Amino acid sequence: MLKKIANTKNIYRPVALLISIYFPPEPGGGSSAAWNRALILSKVGYRVFVICGMPSYPSGKVLEHKYKGKLFYLESIGQINLIRLRVLPLSTTGYFNRFWIFLSFVFLSLLYIPVILRKTGRIELVYSIAPILFSSFCGFVYSKITKSFFVYEVSDIWPEELIVFETLFSSIILTVGKFVAKLSYMVPDAIIAISQLAADHISNQYRPGVNIYVLPIGADPSRFHRLSKKDSRVQLIKGKILPAELEDKFVILYSGLISGATRVDNLAYAAEKLKDDERTIAFLVVGEGEEKAKLQEMKHDFSLDNLYLLPFQPRDLMPRIICAADVCTVSLPSEPIFDVDVPTKFYEYLACGKPQLGICGGEVAKIIESRKIGLTVRDGAINQLVFTIKKLKNCRELIEAMETNSAVVSEEFSLDSMVSRFIDLLKKEKKPIPEIRPH
């Protein structure tokens, strides 16, 4: 629940400044990842301040009345202190719009430095996440002014991921982008990657002169945990979130961004091949993005009554929506650069105990297969995808085994586990471990 920043005059806690344009209550993986990092820093012992945008993702519209007419706004969620900035009111569609949104966030972050530092007090750690590349330089400025330890998290590998879908000026974008990326890796005191393959890529391609640590995103167990599938469906149907016909079907869920980098169209092609099974198998896609119009066209053109498309849902509803599914999907393109990605949704599905259908390779596929928490196919292998869906539907024992394994594996990626990893990072970097103590 949002409230005014609590009085902490009687408690001394070293301050950590987290920089992330996305933050709850916004939907999406970037917001969830930033929330998890803020919780980790708080659990380690820091008093956490977050520089973030006012909630406007993905439409660009700030709807909450309390932000009306404001460029700068202070509030808190529990013990997390938020410094909200109003970025340009543009939808997050297309690289051009995103560039200007990110640039406006960085500009305001730097413009308000004197005000922000008066609110935070002495900062001992700066942790930058998003916007990727931009946040590195923003964090660098704050760390230099405050003489604090600077951690830069690489949530996506840019520009390599960017040019996969860009045809015009790709060579220029790659050349300039790799130069900017190399600079971004030169300025932090430590780098965090979200997977081992991502850490290896950064080390091999850019050779930064600082240590690279792997810190998976994980999931907040206070929000994402096991709920009854039956009860979840009943409540969602009563609330008119899900249609009544889904109550007794085998539901395959995808939630999150719908873009070229998530290849959700694989599910639409599978739905077309499974039209004869539409009375028993349903595909549920919850999210928004540039490729959603393509899914809507496919649903209409192929008469896919077994494909259900919902917009982004409130964050507090997502655990119940996940638990209402039989199987949850992680989908990534086949290009090798995406092998390093582990989307936030993977950990949320895992925490909810759901079997996972990985339409991917790389790190995610390795975890799913080795831990026996789901099955995987490659992007574009539609016949194999259809076969795998039928296999999961027709083998309840297999589903139950995957659910049991998920409960075990989720402990490995819990936030408490991530806290221990971050404390190890501080020890290796010879930084003091925060302790809560009387002022």
Image: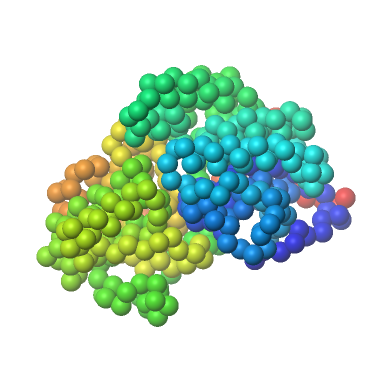
Q: Nearer the viewer, residue 68 or 6?
A: 68
Is 149 placed left or right of 105 in the picture? right
Q: Is residue 369 above or below residue 328?
A: above
Quarter of the view holding residue 247: bottom left
* Residue name at image x 39 percent, y 51 percent: 289
Is 424 placed left or right of 225 in the picture? right
Q: Position of residue 31 (x, y in %)?
A: 53, 51
Q: Position of residue 320 (x, y in %)?
A: 43, 68
Q: Nearer the viewer, residue 139 or 419?
A: 139
Is 254 placed left or right of 36 in the picture? left
Q: Is residue 108 above or below residue 55?
A: above
Q: Position of residue 428 (x, y in %)?
A: 64, 30
* Residue name at image x 22 percent, y 55 percent: 298
Q: Is residue 278 visible?
A: yes
Q: Nearer the viewer, residue 135 or 123?
A: 135
Is 381 placed left or right of 44 in the picture? left
